[in-house]
Image (cartoon, rainbow, N blue to C red):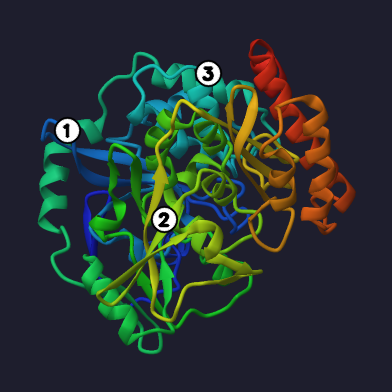
Amino acid sequence: MIQFLLNQELRSEHALDPNLTVLNYLREHVGKSGTKEGCASGDCGACTVVVGELQTDDAGREHIRYRSLNSCLTFVSSLHGKQLISVEDLKHQGELHSVQKAMVECHGSQCGFCTPGFVMSLFALQKNSDAPDHAKAHEALAGNLCRCTGYRPILAAAEQSCCGKQPDQFDAREAETIARLKAIAPTDIGELNSGDKRCLVPLTVADLADLYDAYPQARLLAGGTDLALEVTQFHRTLPVMIYVGNVAEMKRIETFDDRIEIGAATALSDCYEALNAEYPDFGELLHRFASLQIRNQGTLGGNIGNASPIGDSPPLLIALGAQVVLCKGETRRTLNLEDYFIDYKVTARQESEFIEKIIVPRATAEQLFRAYKVSKRLDDDISAVCAAFNLRVENGVITDARMAFGGMAAIPKRAAHCEAALIGAPFTNTVVERACAALAEDFTPLSDFRASKEYRLLSAQNLLRKYFIELQTPHIETRVTAYV
């Protein structure tokens, strides 16, 4: 059985199809049709809902953290122990919520199909920001697409509803909601079981290891932003899943003198602060990683584990010399991330083995790390090419080089010939040009609907040139990077 709050209503479910998404649960099982299906792939934001989770801050104070999610990519099993809020829950005692009023008064809606999703993203923004600036509003709404209104009045609604916000019914009932969430906090392995399909929800790494050993054919479900597409886009059935999002040990971020250890089930939005503090370019790229809804849901371990050649984080992690800790039963092994990827969708992971954590070396003064993403859209788009460069230069000579790319091969991969052309040479334009030529020996990219092979190779070379220019003339870095 799993339990969660549907706004304030306790829901206990045990016989649901584990392949059921929150979107379809709302529309078909509880009659809340305000949440819309626009794409069923997490691209449009029409299905946005907000999930509340009980959190404890550094001072020991309990509070509820509200996050926007794409309900079309969220399986119901992931709601265990949480609060689900849909657009119907915002109106209170016959009065529209302040974010709904702002959308009306600022003329932020025309056909209305996308409006519930915008409203829920605004609601989450209001809960998480006292006075968001334009950049914060843009980030919150970048995963919501509108075909007819235009975004200026919606951004105006964000400003009106979030600046000088007033307490609402959720604030008034926070203590009550905290008590109810504590009362349903999972204490044992949860399960949804429809007879022929099941999803198990462990709470510890040990339980996860035991379950995965017992069900090696199970699919591991973390954020589900990739796995759910098998159900919503390819109409496949997932007979057995194990949801790892309630394993607290795999959602920790720990900082040591020489490294950061990030649990594999940590949401990408939670990784931002630690990674941005060490590597600002990593933080900048995370801002362009899909949408806020996806970053709130997708995990760092999942972005590695799905072994996509165009995943955004692996090239950066490889260039930084990151490692993964793999767990099977009581056995653990640590592997350099670059050795984890073997071929397209083929990894070094053994049966019943899972990624427990990612180890990222901390930055040093000698490192010259930069990362770049080339895509058709600035926001909410997949990379055509993702590049990460990490050099050490001493007395004008390159002593170490780690260059990694996504979108250039069947796996995220280092550019060995390019690195060899750099190491031991002076950091000059002539050497960089030689390294650019060597990239043609490292990669033979494919052509697809995102980019031709010629475009990909030239882009990779130009990004290396860009890296050199920025490091030689740092005062122009901001101006240059703004137009990538």
Q: Quadrant of residue 165?
A: top left
Query: In the structure shown, which secondary structural element does the residue marked by tag 1 occupy?
Result: loop
Could you tell me residue 11's position as x and y percent?
Answer: 24, 63
Question: Could you tell me which quadrant the C terminus lies in?
Answer: top right
Residue labelled with disc 3: 134
In terms of depth relative to the viewer, which is nearer, 323 or 161?
323
Q: Quadrant of residue 342?
A: bottom right
Q: Say which of marks 2 and 1 sits in front.
A: 1
- Height in image: 344 above or below 44? below
Residue labelled with disc 2: 32
**Callout 1 environment at 10 Å: few (<14), some (14 to 19), or many (20+)?**
few
Q: Residue at x 21, y 31 (%)?
A: 171
Q: Which residue is drawn at 61% across and 49% down?
A: 43
Residue labelled with disc 1: 58
Q: Quadrant of residue 130?
A: top left
Q: Which amino acid does label 1 sit on?
A: Asp
